[in-house]
Image (cartoon, grey):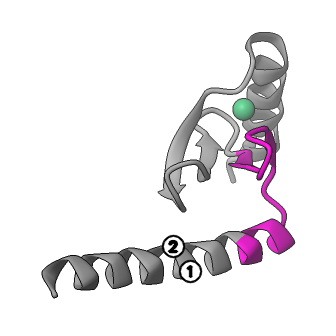
């Protein structure tokens, strides 16, 4: 039986990020100003907060983002509808 070093890779990646910083890519666009990101190396998830800073993507923040996303898309649809009418 082969022993897998699954834990080691994650630790090394976290170490790498500690040295060189996280490399975030956008996973979800909430509004023009708020996006969710994930580090391509260690998978850490962060989100833009209302002040424009990156903070850890907690379940609470994810909920807030989903709410914002709904409000944002609704408002956008409403605007588009007004323009058509
Ligand atoms: Zn990272």
Does 9 appear above or below 4? above
> Which residue is denoted by mark 2 in the rendering?
72
Q: Are marks 1 and 2 in contact (CB under 8 Å)?
A: yes
At 49% from the left and 56% from the top, the residue drawn is 29
Residue marked by disc 1: 71
Task: Point out residue 83 in the picture as x, y percentages from the top left corner.
Answer: 21, 76
- Ligand 1 shows up in which quadrant of the image? top right
**How many other residues sit within 10 Å of disc 1, few (<14), some (14-19) or many (≥20)?**
some
Residue shown at 74% from the left, 78% from the top:
63
Q: Is residue 78 magenta?
A: no
Circle 2: element type? helix
Coordinates of residue 14 in the picture (x, y in percent) = 81, 30
Magenta run includes residue 62: yes
Find residue 16 and name its label.
none
- The image shows residue 44 at horizontal and vertical percentages of 74, 45
**Considering depth in this image, is 26 or 1 the residue closer to the camera?**
26
Mark 1 residue's CB less than 8 Å from ligand 1: no
The secondary structure type at the circle numbered 1 is helix
Q: Which residues are magenta?
A: 44-64
Please name the residue shown 67% across and 45% down the image: 43
């Amino acid at each position: 039986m082969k022993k897998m070093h699954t834990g080691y890779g994650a630790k090394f990646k976290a170490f790498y990020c500690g040295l060189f910083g996280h490399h975030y890519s956008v996973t979800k666009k909430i509004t023009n100003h708020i996006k969710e990101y994930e580090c391509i190396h260690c998978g850490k998830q962060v989100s833009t907060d209302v002040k424009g800073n990156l903070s850890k993507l907690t379940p609470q923040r994810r909920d807030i983002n989903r709410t914002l996303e709904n409000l944002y898309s609704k408002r956008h649809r409403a605007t588009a509808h007004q323009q058509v009418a």
